[in-house]
Image: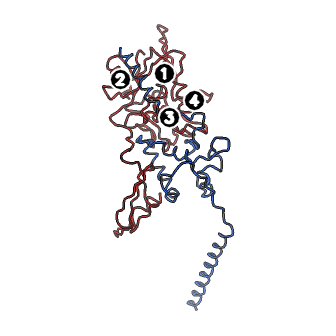
Chain colours: A red, B blue
Amino acid sequence: MTDRSQSFGCGCGCGSKPETVDAGRRGFLAGAVATGATVLAPGVTLFAYGTDPAEAATGADPKKRWGLLIDVSKCADGCTACVTACQTENGWKTTGRPATDPQWIRKVTLRDPKSGATRSAPVMCQHCAAPPCVDVCPTGASFKRADGIVLVDRHRCIGCRYCMMACPYKARSFVHEPLEDQKPHAPRGLGTVEGCTLCVHRVDKGEAPACVEACAGAGGAILFGDIADPKSEISKVIATYATMQIRGDLGVDPGVRYRNL
Amino acid sequence: MSERSSLSRLLLVVGMLIMAMAAGILGAHAGDVPLPAVPKATGGSCVAPPDVMRRSHMSMLQHGRDLSVRQGERVEGGRLTGCISCHAVSDGKGGAVTVSSPQHFCRACHDYAAVKVDCFECHASRPEQPAKATDAAPDAPASSYAALADYAREIAR
């Protein structure tokens, strides 16, 4: 913090400017790989630590909206491949106490009381277009990325758990116990709320979420893609067949859709 | 009379100040705390020179975390993850020490400076342990996308 305040000149309004710029006192543009230096005047050098513009990271694309389509007719009753894959990928496991278990993804069995017919389907964060968890968060920790992925920024999470109460899908959970040796790509810790990230670290690398990859080898019920792009495979299937959102009546517009439910 | 007493009082204060400063300087020399032994990094050159890193690593990390988490702007090898893998300290058993060990790179200085970091309440304090060394291989997407595309075609039929 002192660094930043020192880089704004003397602040007295006298218009004086520092004659030399100490690299150590500069605010940084980015903490990344490339280093650039520009000589502004003799003895004045501007250092920039950031990604080389040629290979700049693009970040979340606002034109995209990532979503899932789950074909319930292909989801076998006892199969938990998606849940296991999520546990392995993100490094969570059940605590043995269901009341405080992590709720990244779970298999839910539905039963029609009249016919007795049952259906089994995975339920995770539905990555809503109008997420109630974001509306209620007092610190801005619960947020929606430009590409539609709803996340918890644990740097800002104070663990109040309003989002857990607001979520109609019970897709968020609270970490009650200290953790060690988390997965480097999936930080999670005591006193913060967590939930499905749609494997954002994989999506940013151009890969599909772990549950989708696991399901492809165990029934192929989950389809992942950009639902904002009418030419994507997932959009074509949604346009062709009747699909539904769980509690679509709430108006939160989930990005996860179900077919044959 | 009053002028004289105020002068003597001033002299007394100045004298006490000089004595206090001298005591401070002598004391610092007498009770020197040994400088921290900073473990050597395993990789090549750092993202910035050491003096810059010492002063500004916290600003760089805070800036980078918002880019990664909120904007989704990732860098090759990760930001904090990159630091952690390059600055891993061997535990002598083929693995790396966690932040619970005083040998941990971050702790070496932070213990000395008595500055508490809470990064590792959520973040891993050492690289992922060897059992899954293939994690970084970037070849997976093509095959997984191909499988998905196959599935999508099948479902559309």
Asked if marks 1 and 2 fall on the same chain, the answer is yes
Q: Which residue is mark 1?
A: A215
**Distance from Cα at disc 4 to Cα at disc 1:** 22 Å
The subunit carrying tag 3 is B
The x, y position of residue A202, in whole percent, is: 46, 33
Q: Work out how far the residue at label 3 is from the one at label 4, CA to CA, in angstroms.
A: 31 Å
Residue wearing tag 4: A101
| Quadrant of the frame with the C terminus of chain A | top left
> Which three-letter amino acid code belongs to the residue tagged 2?
Glu
Label 4–label 2 contact, CB within 8 A: no
Q: Do the residues bearing badges 4 and 1 touch, measured as CB atoms within 8 Å?
A: no
Same chain for labels 4 and 1? Say yes or no: yes
> Which comes sooner in the sequence, label 1 or label 2?
1
* Callout 4: chain: A
Question: Image height check: is B54 above or below B138?
Answer: below
Which quadrant of the structure image shows residue A191? top right
Q: Residues within 10 Å of mark 3 (few under 14, many from 20)?
A: few
State the CA–CA distance, disc 4 to disc 2.
34 Å
**Residue hosting label 2:** A233
Badge 4 amino acid: Asp
Which residue does the numbered mark 3 point to in the structure image? Answer: B137
Element under disc 4: loop
Q: Are marks 1 and 3 in contact (CB under 8 Å)?
A: no
